[in-house]
Image (cartoon, rainbow, N blue to C red):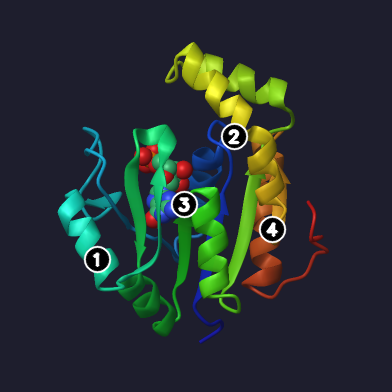
Amino acid sequence: MAYQGKLIIVAGPSGTGKGTIEDAIMAKFPDIQFSVSVTTRPRRDYEIEGEHYFFITKEAFYKLIDRDELVEWQEVYSKNGHLYGTLKSNIDAALEQGKLVLLDIDIKGGINVKKAYPEQSVSIFIKPPSIEALEQRLIHRRTDNQEQIRIRLERMPEEMELGQQFDYQIVNTDLNKAVNAFVEILEKEIYNINKGANKWV
Ligand code: 5GP
């Protein structure tokens, strides 16, 4: 096997274009599999059980916590306090099989996965070019009302601080450049091709 199993942890403030970058990466690297989390939030129309998430009840979620079956879990406040967690069994099985796993996770969750699997993970923080740019994106996205946007922006300084604990930071000013920076990190960290990716992109 050319490489061992590895976790690619991706986090960042909401509205930074993290999902779009991930989609581009998954399309370029078909051998990367998406880590399917458990969540108590309701399924959206386009989502598929077991592909986007495992949708479970709060009771089932608390059972997973009691049985120590989650690597990490968080109550994500911007999502009405719904619970999200990463299944230990999924991660361990994927690593044992030498798979590359991409985790789309909230910032604190990302830090906790890195702590749990320090040798097997690469953590990447996606950040907006500025608070103003993020505000514009959130306004144009039209998924948040003014109050939600204000709360998200207020949280930014703390999130940027936490982001410094990630191995790499990518500033998403331009989608193509951000995807290229991500590819460079993967080539260096996963595929052992070093074209000079720096710790701080
Ligand atoms: P959404 O409900 O929009 O799919 O996700 C809301 C947030 O939860 C996103 O920031 C996403 O990255 C995060 N998230 C998804 N899965 C997990 C998980 O297993 N653990 C943690 N801590 N956060 C997660």
The amino acid type of the residue labelled 2 equals Thr
Residue 186: which quarter of the image? bottom right
Q: Which callout, 1 or 2, points at the residue further toward the start of the chain?
A: 2
Query: Mark 1 — residue?
Result: 64
Residue in front for this viewpoint, 86 or 62: 62
Is 194 on the left-hand or right-hand side of 24? Answer: right
Marks 4 & 1, CB-CB < 8 Å contact? no
The amino acid type of the residue labelled 3 equals Asp
Q: Which callout, 4 or 1, points at the residue further toward the start of the chain?
A: 1
Circle 2: element type? loop
Q: Nearer the viewer, mark 3 or mark 4?
A: 4
Residue in front for this viewpoint, 98 or 10: 10
Query: Mark 3 — residue?
Result: 104
Q: Find the residue positioned furthest to the top.
A: 146
Q: Which callout, 1 or 3, points at the residue further toward the start of the chain?
A: 1
The amino acid type of the residue labelled 4 equals Gln
Compute the Cα span from label 1 to label 3. Answer: 20 Å
Q: Residue at x 20, y 64 (%)?
A: 63
Circle 3: element type? strand
Is 92 on the left-hand or right-hand side of 14? Answer: left
Is 121 on the left-hand or right-hand side of 65? Answer: right
- What is the x, y in percent for residue 84? 35, 51
